[in-house]
Image: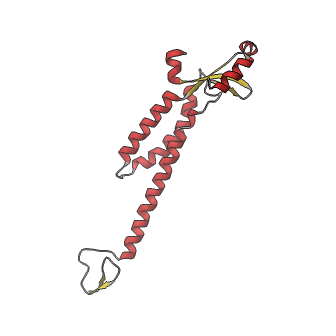
Amino acid sequence: MVGLCSRGRFSPRSNKRGLKPATTVKIAMFRIDRLRLWNAVLLSAALALALGPLRPSPQASVESHGWWVLKWWGPSVVLLVPGLLGKWRGRRIVLIIACVVYFVVFMAHPVCDLISAATQTDFRTELEKGARRGEPFYRLEGEWYQCKSWLSRQFFF
């Protein structure tokens, strides 16, 4: 019986081990690489969405900052789960990295408190100077906010 050896050449021996022709092996390797690429894209997009709550926003107010975080993390988890359900070597490492990223983002995400109009009139120039110096004052959608990390709010409000 004539069969193909692993290099794609014809062999006079029978193919008792069940070796496939080289072209089939290459196609199978291409499928595996495409699957790895798809997992890498999904996981990268998921982790990029997980970082979304790190930018200050009026929606991240003291009352509703939890919903602000979940608004970003919902799609992130939806993209992360299919990539982690498959069986591949590095999924535990990716899961640990994702958990660390989610934990750090939750601790560091800004919680923005609206500065009242009365306070704004008294400290208008101070707010602008403070914002330029790097203090946690931001002008978002025409209003002034004091945005501190969640962890900072827990200790120092």
Q: Considering only vertical position in the picture, is 24 above or below 96?
A: below
Q: Considering only vertical position in the picture, is 134 above or below 50?
A: above
Quadrant, the C terminus: top right
Whether residue 21 is visible to the viewer of this picture, yes or no, is yes
Q: Where residue 99 sits in the image (x, y, percent)?
A: 42, 36
Give the residue drawn at x 74%, y 12%: 122
Name which quarter of the figure residue 139 lies in.
top right
Name which quarter of the figure residue 4 lies in.
bottom left
Q: Is residue 55 left or right of residue 154?
A: right
Q: Considering only vertical position in the picture, is 39 above or below 1?
A: above
Give the residue drawn at x 47%, y 35%: 102
Q: Where residue 34 sits in the image (x, y, percent)?
A: 46, 61
Q: Where residue 26 sits in the image (x, y, percent)?
A: 40, 71
Q: Is residue 139 left or right of residue 1?
A: right
Q: Where residue 148 sits in the image (x, y, percent)?
A: 57, 23
Give the residue drawn at x 26%, y 79%: 15
Q: Nearer the viewer, residue 11 or 120?
A: 120
